[in-house]
Image (cartoon, grey):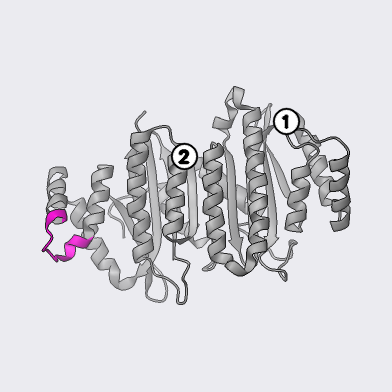
Amino acid sequence: MANESTSNLFRAAYDLFKRIGESDFEYVYRGYFNHNITKKILVLADKSIAKVTGETQATLQKRIYYIMVEGLQNITHHQDEIANDRNFEKYPGIFAIQKSGDKYFITTGNIIANDKVDDLRTRLDTINSLGKEELKKYHREILTGGTISDKGGAGLGLIEMSRKSGSKLHYKFEWLDDEYTYFYLQTQLPSDDNGSTDDDVIHSHCSMDGLMSLHHKMKDENLQLLFNGFFNQENLLSLLAIIKSRSNMPLTTIKISNVMVEMLQNIIKHGVKAEGNNVGARGVFFLGQTGNETILTAGNIIDDNSVATIEDRLKFVNGMAKDALSDYYDNILLDFDSMDAKKTGLGFADLRIKSDRPLKYEFQRLDGGSTFYLLQTAIKTNK
């Protein structure tokens, strides 16, 4: 039920939403990493974890936070190492945190020089071969052995990631060209003391292969940001902060931010919430780049009874000429006495004015009297 043919990005939204269960979430950022972006990523991920774990699991949250910091520092370190040849722009880093069942998965990816692969593989295999007490001893030997430099040295950060998680470090190398290899590193943590730390429970979309498949899809569609889970006012603000930190085009960033607010507020205000859920409304949002356009796509569950009303308002807004739409928006905005039902479609009018194009949408019927509702628009990038 779409008003025009949809793009690959648009069709992918529902598939991404279906990837995770009702109590899970995933957040993925792909692109250039700097201090400000890293800080904002940590804030968003930490708040999302806090909402899911609750105050009773503060120790788990601290362990996850430590591993996220180590992983993000690893990305920026390797990014800085190759900054001179600008290959990080061709092969940007990726950070992902996912929760599925009783596990958290933290995955990072970045390019490294081919001549460093063997040494890194040896260090990882050594760490993975050691038990808890052996890791503790190995950690102490490195601390007292004088091999630590200002860049970390001897895999100390990797050892701590393994110790904090209580599990093996999962990794894969993907050959890129004669100079570089893409290095994926994944750490898994149980969400409670009784959870599994090994691979006896497979979470297909969170596995290394699942994350690599998602990363390839993000590369193919040039997606930079994906949030799939529960939306609330806190993570809305954090997502906006990340967008503002990553762009060097202020005017475009303001327009993108304004459109994001409208789309994400739509999820927060109108998305169906599961009974007893105080975390937020389930939804998916991702941001991509196509040519000189930034594509914004959002999806969430709504009640079946709302479909006809929403579709009528979208058709109404899409059917208006540009000048008529601006006049309509101004008149409704200033008509303080009007209680016309179309007034609730003011957000759609605002989205269409800012994007200067008809809004794309689609409804996917689900079981139980609910519908998955997709909305997409685009902003021209000023280059």
Front position among marks 1 and 2: 2
Contact flag, marks 1 and 2 (Cβ < 8 Å)? no
Residue occupying image coordinates x 33% and y 72% = 304
- What count of labels does the image hold? 2
SS type, badge 1: helix
Q: Residues within 10 Å of mark 2 (few under 14, many from 20)?
A: some
Residue linked to disc 2: 245
- Where is residue 19 shown, x and y percent of the image? 53, 60
Question: Per the image, is 340 magenta?
Answer: yes
As rendered, which of 292 and 235 lies closer to the eye?
Answer: 235
Question: Per the image, is 356 magenta?
Answer: no
Q: Quadrant of the N terminus?
A: bottom left
Q: Amino acid at mark 1?
A: Asn
- Where is residue 37 shown, x and y percent of the image? 52, 41
Residue linked to disc 1: 114
As rendered, which of 163 and 150 lies closer to the eye?
Answer: 150
Q: CA distance from mark 1 to mark 2?
A: 31 Å
- Where is residue 150 shown, x and y percent of the image? 74, 33
